[in-house]
Amino acid sequence: MMKGFTLVEMIIVMSLTVIVSGMLAAILINNTELVYKETSRVSQGLDLNDALVNLKSYIRQAQIVAVSYPEGPSPTYTSSSTQLVLKFSSLDANGEIISNAYDFVIYIQDQDKLRVLLIKDAASSRRQFNTILAKNVDEIDFDYLDAAGDSTSPQDAKKVRVSITLKQKAGSKYETNIATGEANLRND
């Protein structure tokens, strides 16, 4: 008598192997999409947090919200619901204030990026920069508030509230995260 597997036994084993392999593949694919979504969420959360920390820090240091930069008849940047222009006294190499000299920090949405620029006076010791704070920015909104927390014009603002919306494709859907922060101007 011959020992071994019959054709029916082999077909059953192969069928079970295909079924189990298909189930494992489905689990792996679903977990990969889940990991991608969670990684996207964490990345967006970090971008939002870094952007808000940066914004609040510069708002707290600024003397005023400037109406525009450069100040004059043909500004390149204007404080509005989508742009923020902050005005600072320039500092010399010893960290002392230079009278009648000002530096400007400007926040703008540049396509899908939140960009911050520091434009300094020629005499200032601050380092000029142009940096991307966050990517996948869907919307940015600046609200200018008076001391009581009521809406006011940018030049009369005592505090600024900012809301940033990031939107990123995560798997087959879009992931949206919104963060809001508020900070008082220095005003001294």
Image: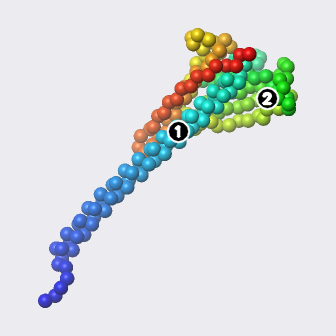
Q: Report the colour scheme.
A: rainbow
Instruction: Say the numbered circle drawn on residue 120.
Output: 2
- Kind of residue sitting beneath label 2: Lys
Q: Is residue 148 above or below residue 171?
A: above
- In the displayed structure, does residue 32 sit left or right of residue 58? left
Q: Give me the residue at 52% from left, 38% from top.
A: 44
Q: Is residue 145 above or below residue 25?
A: above
Where is residue 163? Give x, y as percent.
Answer: 55, 25
- How many numbered marks are there? 2
Residue 20 vs residue 60, the one in the foreground: 60
Q: Secondary structure at mark 1?
A: helix
Q: Secondary structure at mark 2?
A: loop
Residue 161 vs residue 12, the one in the foreground: 161
Residue 53 seen = yes
- Kind of residue sitting beneath label 1: Gln
Instruction: Say the numbered circle drawn on residue 44.
Output: 1
| Quarter-of-image position of residue 162 | top right
Q: Give me the residue at 60% from left, 35% from top.
A: 50
Q: Give me the residue at 76% from left, 29% from top.
A: 119
